[in-house]
Image (cartoon, helix red, strand yellow):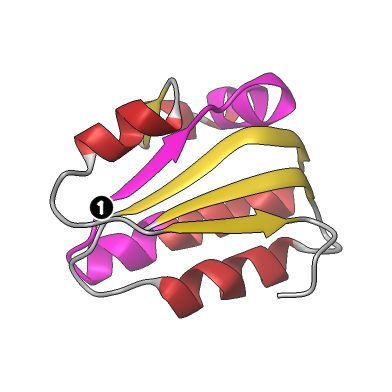
């Protein structure tokens, strides 16, 4: 599954992003979260990424991040998660790395109702 997030992930919508991704997760199928269009992420977004990574591991899935830059990248780097997660330059690289199954694209926007 490929989900492209845009806008901001913070206290106002981080739970909504997590719910959106979890509802689409399938056991044993890879999850790629494309953050190319994400402009901001706070600690709430960081916790969502941690929980999604753990949830994928529990179900035998892999979790990949793509296009992480700016503030989200810095947050992952200073917390040490950058070295733990599968992070790729772009969605195409992440999808290639997640070849364990067919991915479907799912857009998510910080201002949208999901």
Q: Is residue 49 above or below residue 76?
A: below
Q: Residue furthest left?
A: 100
Residue drawn 45% across and 61% down?
Answer: 52
Place of residue 28 in the rendered image (x, y in percent of width and height, measured from the top left): 18, 67
User: On the picture, is 8 further left or further right than 114?
Assistant: right
Tell me the quarter of the picture where residue 87 sits.
top left
Residue 49 lies in the magenta stretch: no
Q: Is residue 94 above or below residue 18?
A: above
The secondary element bearing badge 1 is classed as loop
Q: Nearer the viewer, residue 23 or 18?
A: 23
Residue drawn 62% across and 21% down?
Answer: 69
Q: Which residues are magenta?
A: 53-78
Query: Dot 1 corresponds to which residue?
Result: 62
Residue drawn 68% across and 34% down?
Answer: 37
Residue 57 lies in the magenta stretch: yes
Place of residue 99 in the rendered image (x, y in percent of width and height, measured from the top left): 16, 44
User: On the picture, is 38 further left or further right than 12?
Assistant: left
Tell me the quarter of the picture where residue 8 sits.
top right
Q: Quadrant where the C terminus lies?
A: bottom right
């Amino acid at each position: 599954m490929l989900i492209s997030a845009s806008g901001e992930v913070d206290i106002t919508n981080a739970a909504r992003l997590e719910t959106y991704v979890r509802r689409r997760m399938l056991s044993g199928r890879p999850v790629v979260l494309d953050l190319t269009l994400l402009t901001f992420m706070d600690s709430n977004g960081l916790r969502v990424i941690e929980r999604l990574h753990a949830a994928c591991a529990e179900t035998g899935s892999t979790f990949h991040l793509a296009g992480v830059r700016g503030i989200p990248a810095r947050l992952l780097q200073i917390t040490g998660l950058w070295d733990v997660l599968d992070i790729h330059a772009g969605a195409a690289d992440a999808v290639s790395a997640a070849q364990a199954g067919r991915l479907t694209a799912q857009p998510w926007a910080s201002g949208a109702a999901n």
